[in-house]
């Protein structure tokens, strides 16, 4: 029997909420639903349990007054990510229900709590990462979790690109060290994260091989800067990578597809290269035989939510992502839905049709 390495897919990241004085984990609606200003009523999307989109319920809620070290943000745009689908389905477990999901948004500071000196009402800001709870029109959150936006970056751009940009920074500069001359395989190169990865990798002078499902998406990925495209779900990815690299393989393969794609990614990597698994859009990642790591290949399964739980690391990645946005390393916006149409947004995201990010607009 070959040894296998199970790929763990847990995203439980506790984080302190200063207003309540204790610890709360992702999925709990602490930042959008505690008692506050009785004069302001907003919308919130509650997830009543794991499952399909029928588990969402849009409700009115009273907006919270910010406590010590907190600010209140009126959202202008809310980003959606496959992470939200994993939370909704229970693939990444949520400790209790009802819950509020959503990991990034941008808007304007509506109120400032005591001890907050570096932000003021009217400032344009964005945030991403834990604690989740962005599916609401107004949110109270720790001030240390938000980043001020420069004039050149719109709320929609920030909401579509901040978490993905932070993920790209973590993958390209911290998990791996992509640099001038690196060869990198990026799956779903026309998608939300894929488009930022392609653009960022090209800014580092890497050679990018992308995979896409359709010729139309190949045109998009090419416009982002991909050097080579492997098109179609039935394509022999390993053989094509070997052909494009003269039999050497790539230095890095970034796989957000999951399912049986991870083994193909590993087989596309050169000796002493690295495959990185960051998602499971095509299904759970099966155990990986240790033999697949020969000769000397590495396998990494980083988590942007775990990375961002540390405030200093979070702010470092967020600053890098905002600087990338200013350099037009951004995610294309594929569609926009009203907050009350969150179910339609999730259906569109799961369909795989969207080439880019889907936004919720309160």
Image: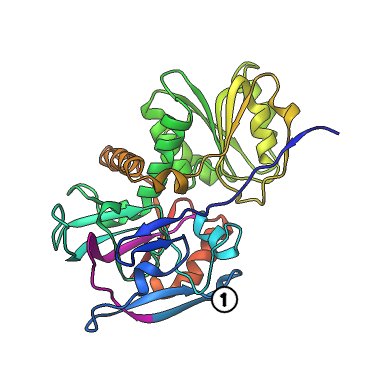
Find disc 1 in the rendering and name its residue: 54
- Image location (x, y in percent) of residue 213: 60, 45
Q: Which image quadrant: the N terminus?
A: top right
Q: Is residue 53 visible?
A: yes
Left or right, 40 with respect to 215, comes to: left
Q: Is residue 135 magenta?
A: no
> What residue is shown at x 65% (from left), y 22% (from top)?
242
Residue furthest to the right: 1
Q: Nearer the viewer, residue 307 or 136?
A: 307
- Above or below for 169 versus 81: above
> What residue is shown at x 28% (from left), y 76% (from top)?
63
> What residue is shown at x 64% (from left), y 33% (from top)?
265
> What residue is shown at x 36% (from left), y 28% (from top)?
203
- Image location (x, y in percent) of residue 214: 58, 45
In which quarter of the view is residue 78 placed?
Answer: bottom left
Left or right, 149 with respect to 268, comes to: left
Q: Nearer the viewer, residue 47 or 23?
A: 23
Q: Which image quadrant: the C terminus?
A: bottom left
Q: Is residue 70 magenta?
A: yes
In which quarter of the view is residue 94 placed?
Answer: bottom right
Report helix, strand or loop for mark 1. helix
- Image location (x, y in percent) of residue 108: 21, 62
Residue furthest to the front: 21
Magenta stretch, residue numbers: 60-81
- Above or below for 170 versus 48: above
Mark 1, other Cα within 10 Å: few <14 / some 14–19 / many ≥20 = few
């Amino acid at each position: 029997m070959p040894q296998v390495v199970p790929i763990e897919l847990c995203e439980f990241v506790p984080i302190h909420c200063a207003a309540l004085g204790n610890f709360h984990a992702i999925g709990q609606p602490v930042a959008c639903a505690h008692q506050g200003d009785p004069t302001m009523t907003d919308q919130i999307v509650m997830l009543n349990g794991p499952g399909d989109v029928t588990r969402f319920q849009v409700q009115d809620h009273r907006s919270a007054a910010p406590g010590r070290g907190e600010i209140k943000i009126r959202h202008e745009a809310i980003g959606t990510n496959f992470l939200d689908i994993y939370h909704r389905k229970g693939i990444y477990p949520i400790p209790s229900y009802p819950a509020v999901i959503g990991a990034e948004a941008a808007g304007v500071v509506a109120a400032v709590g005591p001890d907050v000196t570096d932000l003021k009402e009217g400032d344009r800001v964005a945030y991403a990462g834990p604690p989740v709870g962005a599916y609401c029109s107004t949110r109270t959150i720790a001030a240390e979790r938000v980043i001020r936006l420069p004039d050149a970056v719109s709320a929609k751009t920030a909401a579509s690109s901040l978490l993905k940009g932070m993920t790209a920074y973590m993958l390209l500069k911290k998990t791996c060290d992509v640099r001038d001359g690196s060869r990198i395989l990026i799956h779903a190169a026309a998608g939300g994260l894929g488009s930022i990865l392609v653009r960022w990798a090209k800014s580092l002078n890497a050679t990018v091989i992308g995979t896409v499902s359709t010729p139309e998406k190949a045109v998009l990925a090419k416009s982002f800067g991909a050097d080579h495209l492997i098109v179609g779900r039935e394509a022999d990815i390993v053989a094509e990578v070997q052909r494009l690299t003269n039999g050497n393989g790539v230095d890095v393969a970034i796989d957000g597809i999951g399912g049986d794609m991870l083994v193909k990614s590993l087989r596309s990597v050169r000796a002493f290269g690295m495959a990185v698994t960051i998602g499971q859009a095509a299904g759970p990642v099966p155990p990986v035989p240790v033999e697949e790591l020969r000769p000397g290949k590495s396998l990494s399964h980083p988590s942007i939510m775990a990375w961002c739980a540390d405030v200093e690391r979070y702010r470092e990645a967020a600053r890098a992502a905002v600087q990338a946005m200013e350099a037009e390393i951004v995610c294309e916006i594929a569609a926009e839905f009203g907050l009350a149409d969150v179910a339609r947004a999730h259906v569109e995201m799961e369909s795989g049709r969207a080439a880019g990010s889907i936004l919720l607009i309160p």
